[in-house]
Image (cartoon, rainbow, N blue to C red):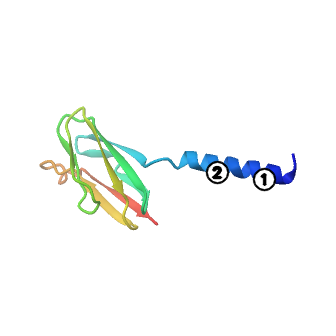
Amino acid sequence: MKAAQLLTALCTALIVLTGCTASGPREIKIVTTEMKFTPDVIQAKAGEQIKFTIANNGTVLHEFVSDELKFQEIEVYPGETKSVMVTMPAAGEYPFYCEAKGHHEAGMAGKVLVAQ
């Protein structure tokens, strides 16, 4: 195979592989239990689309809320799993928490660290 043909084949393969890896939002699964999110620190990039999937492995209602990220709070009952899509804003630190009575005060909180 000539060098030009080999280079063309390699470039075509790279384009195909790149297209295959850039499909859709990144999913991050967060598990809730009594007074805890796991993980409670999430890394993301500005402009990235994230699908947060919240699984309630606890015994009481939990909520996923962020005053700074643009999504409607979600309530997740024991045994349920719910998702929300969020496009990450500019670089910064964005807290999230559970708004169920007493949960945030008991430390049920986390943060999304958004980089450029």
Q: Residue at x 17, y 37 (%)?
A: 60
Give the mark nearest the N terminus, 2 or 1: 1
Q: Residue at x 36, y 64 (%)?
A: 89
Horizontal arrangement in the rendering, residue 74 relative to residue 85 (left or right): left
Q: Residue at x 52, y 50 (%)?
A: 22
Which residue has dot 2 on it?
15
Which residue has dot 1 on it?
7
**Above/below status of 91 relative to 43:** below
What amino acid does circle 2 point to? Ile
Secondary structure of residue under mark 1? helix
Please identify the residue farthest to the top as the structure is shown: 79
Query: For mark 2, does the 10 Å Cα neighbourhood hold few (<14), some (14 to 19), or many (20 or more) residues?
Result: few
Residue 73 screen position, x and y as percent = 21, 51
Name the disc covering residue 74, or none.
none
Give whichever of 38, 24 is nearer the camera.
24
Asked which quadrant contains residue 71, the reply is bottom left
What amino acid does circle 1 point to? Leu
Secondary structure of residue under mark 2? helix
Horizontal arrangement in the rendering, residue 12 relative to residue 46 (left or right): right
**Above/below status of 48 relative to 26:** below
Horizontal arrangement in the rendering, residue 94 relative to residue 20 (left or right): left
Residue 88 screen position, x and y as percent = 37, 60
**Above/below status of 101 relative to 78:** below
Give whichever of 80, 31 is nearer the camera.
80
Residue 82 screen position, x and y as percent = 28, 40
Residue 56 screen position, x and y as percent = 26, 37
Distance between the alpha carbons at the discs numbered 2 and 1: 12 Å
Query: For mark 1, does the 10 Å Cα neighbourhood hold few (<14), some (14 to 19), or many (20 or more) residues?
Result: few
- Quarter in which the N terminus is drawn: top right
